[in-house]
Amino acid sequence: MTQYIIRRVMQAIPLLFLISVFVFFLIRQAGDPFAGRILEAGTSAEDLSRQRRAAGLTDPVWLQFIHWYLGDDWYQRDLSGDGEPDTFGRRQGILRGDLGVSVQRNEPVVKTIRRFLPWTLLLGATALTTTIVFGVAIGMLASLRPYSIFDNIVTTLSFVTFSTPIFLIALLSVFIFSVKFREWGLPYLPTGGTSDWRAGGATFGDVAQRLILPTVSLAAIQIAAYSRFIRASMLDVLNSDYIRTAHAKGLKRRRVVMLHAFKNASFPLITLVALDIPVFLSGAVVTETIFSWPGMGKLFIDSLNQLDPPILLAFTLFVALTVVTMQLIADIVYAWVDPRVRYT
Amino acid sequence: MSKAIRLAVLSSLLIIVTSLSGALAVRAQQSTLVIGFSQEPPNLFPLNNLAYGGLLENFYVRNLWEFDVENTAYPVMATEIPSEENGRVVFTEDGDTAVTVTLREGMLWSDGTPITAADCEVWHTIRSDSSTSASVNRAAYPSAVSSFEIDAEDPLTFTITYNGLFPDYVGANERAECQYPGHIFGPMIEDGGVLEDNDYFLGGADFDGLKTVGYGPYAMESWDIGSVATFVRNPFWDGPEPAWDRVVVPFIAESAQMRNALQQGEIDVAFNWGDDQFDNYASIADVEVFNVPSVFADALWIRSGELGNSDNHGGDALMDVSVRQAIAHAIDRINLAEELVAPGIPVPPAWYPSQFWPDDLVFLEYNPDGARALLDEAGWVETGAPLIDGGDGVRAKDGVELSNLRLVSTQDELRNNYQIFIQDYLAEIGIGVDVQIIPATTLFASFVDGGTLTNYEWDLAVFAYSVNPLTPVGIPTAFGCEGVPTTDNPDGFNPWQFCDPEYDEIDRLLANTLPGPEREELTHEAVRLHTDFAFWNGLRTRVTWYAVYDTVVNPESVAANVGALSSNWFAMIELWEPAG
């Protein structure tokens, strides 16, 4: 097991490096983070030039990549513009745990991520839990009565939900549960944010209330996918010989379904959940933007709009690292719960 | 399921339901104004110079003088606006301009510290010395200012001396800045510190529970980055008392959600929303909608020089002013502004602000026959098949077709609509246009970064280039011959290649000529030359939209007390009145 983990970690290093190279040069091609500022009154060419030099954007691209990895605190730049290098950089590089400084926020990227990640963790965990609970329950119920009215309704709804863009689900949910419910005199939900803006502060109730619509939006499509997956998996298992044997032995149906059928049908769910965790952790770009939820997805889209390369790079690395880690964890857990799987 | 688990689940559900029902109850806060912003500034850094960068500062800083909706200056921190008449502007024996400012007595920062000229000196240091910060936009300040002196006998009086004759000391970008507290900012830069590194600019400081120190009606109480900023009354503010105890600014990027939030009463004012949302906001009961012209105007820019010419894109056609005028005449710009934006949106005839226009300034009106005549006269005659039904045949001259002109813009629904209509209008007179949408970070990038404009990979463009409405002096790097970007001049930003030595000379003179008839005539001549070149053709004055609940705020008081300089929208919020 230990050897297996070490081998997988070693394999992940070149993969992450390749991803970082690809992403770095891709983002570098996205243009100049300071470009739009030239259109503002009061910005001189000298100002822009100095800001570009300070951000290291005037260095050769290969050197910028090295600085991103190793830092630039050993490298002098000409910040005064007199042609003579005069100022050492202040970055330490990602290998020393420094993800750089946001060019738009003037803040260490680590600190920025620390602001936004907790909100994404909250929304992601809630949405993932909701997805698993409802997806599994609906999938199981549908599989126990295949081709029944309930199963057909679930199947139809799953396909409709799965085919609907998330922004439409989000805006529709606001329109119905917020706008229309208010019109109809029913208790309604707020349109977005994390707190009651007028009252100030964020109580548990405020947050919980504002968590509902983004959670529903995020989970709806995933529930559709999970329920289809569990249904198919359960149907496979329910037709197995050992299930028939269990029934023949006189075990209660509930015990057969929960202990024998669901346990085996749920093994592939581990992979599904493990692959979804990075998706939830990286934030939901559309959902967080629509609901003004200050998570990683919103940070990503804001940074993309403003072109903030250090944040975009850190975000991408974070996602890549999470995917690799979760895949490794999924493999380990899979083998742990299913003794038939062996490491080679 | 065991009893314990059932109990835990039930308890959790009970807690959630209880908290939800509590939160769903209506909370009436009589003294809170909620203003929805579509864009959140990246930081509080002074003069980061993003158009929306100073939005939050509007609540907690004020200037020596401010500008009202008519862009007329009125004193705020200063006792009076300096002028030759009141003896505060003096021309020295060396030919320099000495401007003396006296601060009003008794002003205090929001932490109770007295405001003195020493505060202004700290900001002078920051603007003069690039080692204090890389990110401050200093513009011409370091070269324009020769000295800053505090009066030896009056700690509230200081004198700034500008090199040579300097007429624009009142202008927004050259006024002496006293917005920031020296006792806070000074220590940040002592011992070689760099200003922008400080947590202060991200709401990380603490001054008795407040996050900023300033001189304004409010002070920042909290800033949940990515979510909401809250301001409370500044107890040391000596100006007019603002009507609300708190101002809350949630950041709502999604346009439909901003509208929903207003309709739900979660916000009282929706600010700076898109032009295409007019009908949506106007249809909300009790909501009044209005706009204020900004300093931006979207225009059709035409690449007018030889750099970038190619037979695949009309050859040298655009170097001919007749062709450029024909393009302007071919587009019904007034109708487009009415139809695509909103009724009454003005179409400016010149890049310069209206107060600098000469009486004889000509707007190139919609006149497709006139456009055809100009093209015929210039030798660009119909040759090929029509580009659209009923349109002229594609025009050509010496075997080069006037087609495939690259019409570029950023990704913006309104601008992209404009592109399509312009394509149609030009097709009618036989000019072929290829519409391209390019990210702003590439379109406006510098020469070395492969910018579309600066590398001449365009022929026509739709975007706005902001103007300083307080001075007739142009922007040499954008409109001077010295600004044409090349390998030898990679920092230049005159990709339209407007290069007229006579204009350059007039612009230089303007920067050193005092207000009066001579300056006025120079200004008019500069505007004429700039406009006659027909490389800039106004499409619409960009406006800032407000939607205001008239049951909460008096809309007239808002409309009369918002700034129009794109940096001072809320600089008079203390004059906003509650409804009724």
Image (spheres, coloured by chain):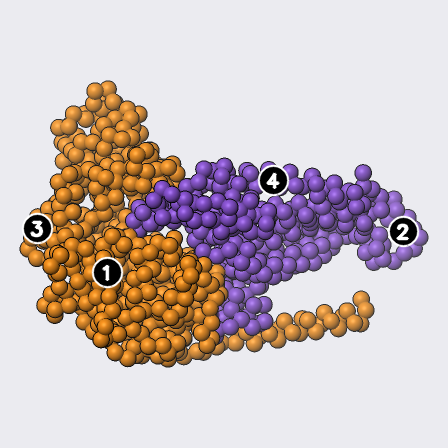
Q: Earlier in the sequence, mark 2 or mark 4?
A: 4
Across and down, in percent, residue A19 comes to: 58, 40
Q: Colour of chain B?
A: orange
Q: Assess disc 4: are there few (<14), some (14-19) or many (≥20) residues with their C-alpha within 10 Å of its C-alpha.
A: few
Location of the C terminus of chain B by quadrant is bottom left
Question: In the rendered structure, which amino acid carries the disc numbered 4?
Answer: Phe
Please state the horizontal and vertical placement of residue B439, each as a whole percent of the image: 40, 42
Q: Are marks 3 and 1 on the same chain?
A: yes
Of circles 1 and 2, the one toward us is: 1
Q: Output the chain of dot 3.
A: B
Q: Sort mark 1 into few (<14), some (14-19) or many (20+) by Cα contacts within 10 Å.
A: some
Tally of numbered discs = 4
Q: Chain of mark 1?
A: B
Identify the element where label 4 is drawn. Answer: helix
Q: What residue type is disc 2 on?
A: Ala
Q: Secondary structure at mark 1?
A: strand
Q: Which residue is mark 3?
A: B521
* Same-chain check, marks 1 and 2: no
Q: Which residue is mark 1?
A: B147
Image check: B507 left or right of B462? left
Residue at point 12%, 69% (across, down): B87
Q: Residue at x 81, y 38 (%)?
A: A344
What is the display colour for chain A?
purple
Q: Please state which of the two labelled residues, at mark 3 or mark 1, is closer to the viewer.
A: 1
Q: Which residue is mark 4?
A: A17
Answer with left or right where residue B445 lies relative to residue A42.
right
